[in-house]
Amino acid sequence: MFNRFKRKSVENTGPKPVRIGNRWAAPMMIACAVIGLAWIVVFYTISNTDHTIPWYSDLGGWNLMIGMGFILAAFGFAMKWE
């Protein structure tokens, strides 16, 4: 009885929303965080010992900046993750 008074569905003619998330964002976030943490841990572990890694030990204090750079990149990937 009331079926003839129902409104017809209106098609959405606007643009579809764009997905900003990526499937690889979460694995890259975890990988960058682990690499950054491992980089800093190795730096502090071998800094006051006789053990040296040829190119790693030459960087000196920059190792801390490199490790923090990886962790910062992990936060960047976290923003892309949905």
Image: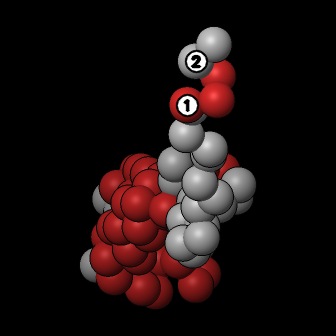
Q: Position of residue 12 (x, y in %)?
A: 59, 61
Element under disc 2: loop
Residue 43 location, quadrant: bottom left
Residue 47 location, quadrant: bottom left
Q: Position of residue 81 (x, y in %)?
A: 52, 53
Query: Seen in the image, is 44 located left or right of residue 34?
Result: left
Element under disc 1: helix
Q: Position of residue 66 (x, y in %)?
A: 41, 76
The disc label shown at residue 33, or none: none
64 or 22, nearer to the observer: 22
Quadrant the N terminus occupies: top right
- Badge 1: few (under 14), some or many (20 or more) residues near its Cα, within 10 Å? few
Q: Is residue 48 visible?
A: yes
CB of mark 1 within 8 Å of CB of mark 2? Answer: yes
Q: Residue at x 38, y 74 (%)?
A: 69
The disc label shown at residue 2, or none: 2
Can you say whether 46 is above or below 1 in the image?
below
Disc 1: which residue? 5
3 or 31, nearer to the observer: 3
Q: Residue at x 57, y 31 (%)?
A: 6
